[in-house]
Amino acid sequence: MKEGPDIARIAALIGDPARANMLAALIDGRALTASELAAEAGVTKQTASSHLARLSEGGLLAFESQGRHRYFRLADQDVGHALETLMGLASTRGLSRTRTGPKDPALRHARVCYGHLAGEMGVALLNGMVARRWFKPDDGLSLTPSGRRALIDFGVDIPALENLRRPLCRPCLDWSERRHHLAGSLGEALFDRIAARNWARREKGTRVVYFTPNGERALVKWLG
Amino acid sequence: MKEGPDIARIAALIGDPARANMLAALIDGRALTASELAAEAGVTKQTASSHLARLSEGGLLAFESQGRHRYFRLADQDVGHALETLMGLASTRGLSRTRTGPKDPALRHARVCYGHLAGEMGVALLNGMVARRWFKPDDGLSLTPSGRRALIDFGVDIPALENLRRPLCRPCLDWSERRHHLAGSLGEALFDRIAARNWARREKGTRVVYFTPNGERALVKWLG
DNA sequence: CCCATGGTACGATCCCGCTCGAACCATCAT
DNA sequence: ATGATGGTTCGAGCGGGATCGTACCATGGG
């Protein structure tokens, strides 16, 4: 009778506190051993083993055995993004725990979220562009003519993006900042240009983004 | 010990099958009554009432009482976006229910979804219209001037629709196709015109839509 | 070889929460 | 008024699953 993707199964997997803690501990893309994750979740190794088996079975985790250790990581970045989306939801619904944000301060400062920029820098980027009237926040987000010109000057091939079927720009809720940053094809292209100018680079294997001191200065200067 | 947003709470809310079905039924942004949602989830009104209270309490749903009816809708589009993300995860993890899509192939080919067209034909319809630049998918879906003309030519009274309070057009996630089809008042009116031309007819008592061979040809010709 | 360590498998317990029946309240129709 | 319908509240039953103790398998080090 019921139809569609089994969203309940996935959500139920994430919905157990112990499993959610494990997933949250893995959100920076690193791999941890089963024992570490057990400690992280505050359960014994036996229960952790059961949970990890379920998460792997459900396709949320991948693992590789090295010697007598078993390293678990998020199956892919989509899982991490889904977790971020849920974190964003949770924080705006007043369901945050004592401290909001990732353990790793680098992640909170700048990271990628589906190919676009998130974290403090992502939010600051969008804020600056809105302040310059490059975007108008009317039930969503729309690019103004002046913004269009400015971004084309910056090197973004906007006409090409407009021909795609994907949405050009979209606000995406940032879970560590509880504000929106820029998503959509434009968000990705913009980060692409930033990376091309060596203002920032992605840390391989994780979602952390490191801004160079010069790059951070240049970005501030660009947006005033 | 614990940190970050309480992702487990939100995920557990979504993780119950009955609640997930309700949320999925609301993903197009429309508002449904408690009884409709109970039927959608396959539970009695009492349990549905409890679930709906929890979802509202958790900030995922909003409701407004009209007379003796209580209309529930997703609290905001962030909730819908999170649900879509989970659906995306679920479908790529092969966790779609045993059979992805309806048992009846006819349903998968064409059916009504709250008065508008869904299934393969519904997705093809929207794809064709987007390819003809009648719609632009910018954070949702918007009708272009040329699309407006074309649909008026087709017999849709668009000015009348624009006077309604309901949204004119809206993308609706097609669960069997994993792509969007056209919803909103325009989606309904368009299907109404298609039926008026005897290109298709609804099977009474079900959601199945049968296209006549001539009708399917005509539709293909209309959209190239 | 024996032992320590990381990890899993199985069983038993126990509790959360999903579910429905029955009763109750509110709104609308007549 | 009375009845019909939409929705909620309360209580009880019950099942699933989260947890841990014990036992077991692998790897690595002496």
Image: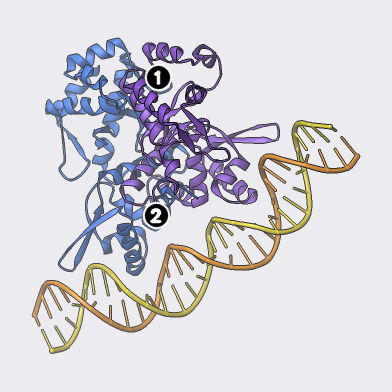
Chain colours: A blue, B purple, C yellow, D orange
Residue B1 at least partly seen: no
- Crowding at label 2, few (<14), some or many (≥20) Cα neighbours within 10 Å? few
Quadrant hosting residue A105: top left
According to the image, label 2 marks what residue? B98
According to the image, label 1 marks what residue? B142
| Residue at the spot 49% in from the left edge and 52% down from the top edge | B16
Measuring from the top left, give residue D23's x and y in whole percent: 32, 84
Quadrant hosting residue A213: top left
Q: Nearer the viewer, residue B150 or A128?
A: B150
Residue at the extreme front of the image, as rendered: B214
Label 1 vs label 2, nearer the camera: 2
- Crowding at label 1, few (<14), some or many (≥20) Cα neighbours within 10 Å? some
C-alpha span from label 1 to label 2: 35 Å
| Amino acid bearing label 2 | Thr
| Residue at the spot 55% in from the left edge and 42% down from the top edge | B57
Q: Is residue B45 above or below residue A108?
A: below
Share a chain, discs 1 and 2?
yes
Q: Is residue A107 above or below residue A188?
A: below
| Amino acid bearing label 1 | Ser
Which SS class for mark 1? strand
Quadrant hosting residue A100: top left
Pointer 1 indicates a residue of which chain?
A: B
Q: Is residue B113 above or below residue A9?
A: above
Pointer 2 indicates a residue of which chain?
A: B
Q: Is B114 left or right of A90, judged from the image as shown?
A: right
What is the total number of numbered labels drawn onto the structure image?
2
| Residue at the spot 35% in from the left edge and 65% down from the top edge | A50
| Residue at the spot 34% in from the left edge and 38% down from the top edge | A176
Tell me which label, 1 or 2, sits earlier in the chain.
2
Residue A212 at least partly seen: yes
